[in-house]
Image (cartoon, rainbow, N blue to C red):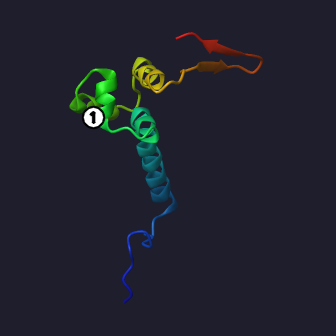
Amino acid sequence: MKEETFAEWRPDWTPAEQKQVDEAASYLRDQVSLLKVLREQLGLSQLELSDILGTSQSNVSKIETKADPRISVIRKLIEHQGGRLKIVAEFPDKALELQL
């Protein structure tokens, strides 16, 4: 019998079971922290981010576990890196930039 790697393994799930797995995977993807993704894209460690935010590394770790971080935290990081955070509400007939 040929051994399979985890990536090659495909269970014999029913369509209902596959749907349940797909929904669970989608939920987990949605839980990935926006702050963590942004930090990693900027090439910063949690310790470097903690210095920027004026908090501890352990607190940054806690913040990153939240799927919905505060806008003020995101804005502070972006501005520290020389950027500007813009939030735009788009409607069918117009777009409004929200002042932060």
What residue do we see at 33% from left, 30% from top? 49
Query: Which residue is outermost to the bottom?
Result: 1
Residue 6 quadrant: bottom left
Q: Amino acid at mark 1?
A: Leu
Query: Which residue is outermost to the front?
Result: 82
Q: Is residue 34 above or below residue 24?
A: above
Residue 79 placed where, x, y %? 47, 21
Residue 82 placed where, x, y %? 50, 24
Count up the numbered dots. Answer: 1
Q: Is residue 69 above or below residue 72?
A: below
Determine whether, in the image, residue 65 is placed left or right of residue 13: left
Residue 93 placed where, x, y %? 77, 17
Determine whether, in the image, residue 50 is placed left or right of residue 68: left
Query: Which residue is outermost to the top?
Result: 99
What residue do we see at 46% from left, 40% from top? 41
What residue do we see at 74% from left, 16% from top? 94
Q: Residues within 10 Å of mark 1 (few under 14, many from 20)?
A: some
Q: Nearer the viewer, residue 28 or 71?
A: 71
What residue do we see at 54% from left, 21% from top? 85
Q: Nearer the viewer, residue 39 or 7?
A: 39
**Label 1 belongs to which residue?**
47
Q: Is residue 96 above or below residue 5?
A: above
Callout 1: SS: helix
Q: Which image quarter is the N terminus in?
A: bottom left
Determine whether, in the image, residue 59 is placed left or right of residue 53: left
